Image: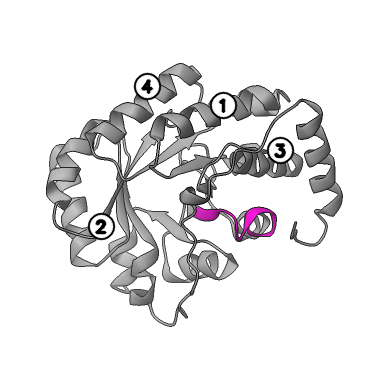
């Protein structure tokens, strides 16, 4: 396993602890969505293929979601990310385009019952979602109940079927060891991505966290940085650190050079 400097001991400890409670590995190669050839980011427009143009505010309206989809297709963004209530609306707007429709499950707290998350995942896939971003049960992970946290992720992955799942770890709320454990559990549960943040927990993506994720699971999982990415330099830094996707509400301002 390739790890970044200083994480070898933590990673070995995490693997041993995970295996000691009987957590299996059910990795699915079909879930992989890694950018194999990474373009050089020289100007703001080069970031367009990385962006998931995002509108997850509780006050988001139908009109704001339609605008989001229009902006995403006009700027050739990789996808849009909307709340479950707007999946069918966004799907209708994106028909005939190459823009992915991403939605969220157990958002933003991750504290739902696992069965509820699984049902929600199944429902949004049936409604047309191309990818699902789920929030882990943060308190359960922090309590050290790693088997239950694994089962929560696994329930959503199974419910989503062939649809890729991103696991939001909410890195700002975890210590370094918990970040390592979270990444490894997401991988073992068969998810496609690890994701830094919801943007609702007082902290967003950091270059250090993206590097940590890249060092732990890069090459086997994709990485999504989200939360607090508001200008070209910070977005480019995330990609250079290893991010395959950028969840961002400032996408248009960034690629147009006005951010």
Q: Are marks 3 and 2 in contact (CB under 8 Å)?
A: no
The vertical placement of 248 against 86, above or below, is below
- Check the picture and name the quadrant holding the N terminus: bottom right
Which residue is painted at 42% across and 31% down in the image?
107
Q: Give the residue at mark 3.
A: 178
Instruction: Answer with the quarter of the image where residue 58 lies.
Output: top left
Q: Are marks 1 and 3 in contact (CB under 8 Å)?
A: no
Q: Give the residue at mark 2.
A: 99
Please state if 18 lies on the left or on the right of 200 as rendered.
Answer: right
Q: Give the residue at mark 4.
A: 119
Residue 34 in percent (x, y) is at: 49, 61
Q: Are marks 4 and 1 in contact (CB under 8 Å)?
A: no
Q: Are marks 2 and 4 in contact (CB under 8 Å)?
A: no
Please state if 21 lies on the left or on the right of 239 as rendered.
Answer: right
Q: Give the residue at mark 1.
A: 137
The region drawn magenta spans 214-224
Q: Earlier in the sequence, mark 2 or mark 4?
A: 2
Please state if 230 lies on the left or on the right of 221 as rendered.
Answer: left
Q: Earlier in the sequence, mark 1 or mark 3?
A: 1
Q: Residues within 10 Å of mark 1 (few under 14, many from 20)?
A: many
Q: Earlier in the sequence, mark 4 or mark 1?
A: 4
Q: Residues within 10 Å of mark 3 (few under 14, many from 20)?
A: many
Which residue is painted at 35% across and 67% down in the image?
49
Task: Tell me the CA gap for discs 1 and 2.
Answer: 29 Å
Under tag 1, what secondary structure? loop
Task: Tell me the CA gap for discs 2 and 4.
Answer: 25 Å
Between label 3 and label 2, give the one nearer the viewer.
2
Residue 86 in percent (x, y) is at: 21, 36
Between label 4 and label 1, give the one nearer the viewer.
4
Under tag 3, what secondary structure? helix
Task: Tell me the CA gap for discs 3 and 4.
Answer: 27 Å
């Amino acid at each position: 396993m390739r790890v970044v400097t200083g994480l070898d001991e933590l990673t070995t400890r995490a693997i041993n602890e995970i295996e000691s409670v009987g957590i299996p590995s059910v990795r699915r190669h079909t879930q992989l969505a890694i950018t194999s050839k990474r373009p050089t980011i020289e100007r703001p427009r080069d970031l367009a293929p990385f962006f998931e143009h995002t509108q997850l505010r509780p006050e988001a309206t139908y009109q704001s979601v339609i605008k989001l989809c229009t902006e995403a297709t006009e700027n050739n963004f990789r996808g849009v990310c909307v709340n479950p209530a707007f999946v069918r609306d966004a799907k209708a707007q994106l028909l005939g385009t190459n823009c992915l429709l991403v939605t969220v499950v157990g958002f933003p707290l991750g504290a739902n019952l696992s069965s509820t998350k699984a049902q929600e995942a199944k429902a949004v896939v049936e409604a047309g979602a191309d990818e699902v971003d789920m929030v882990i049960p943060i308190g359960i992970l922090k309590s050290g109940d790693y088997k239950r946290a694994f089962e929560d992720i696994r329930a959503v992955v199974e419910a989503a079927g062939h649809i890729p799942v991103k696991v939001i770890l909410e890195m700002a709320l975890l210590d370094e060891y918990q970040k390592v454990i979270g990444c490894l559990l997401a991988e073992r549960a068969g998810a496609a991505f690890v994701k830094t943040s919801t943007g609702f927990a007082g902290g967003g993506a950091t270059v250090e966290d993206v590097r940590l994720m890249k060092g732990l699971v890069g090459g086997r999982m994709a990485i999504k940085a989200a939360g607090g990415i508001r200008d070209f330099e910070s977005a480019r830094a995330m990609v250079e650190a290893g991010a395959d996707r950028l969840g961002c509400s400032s996408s248009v301002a960034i690629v147009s050079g006005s951010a």
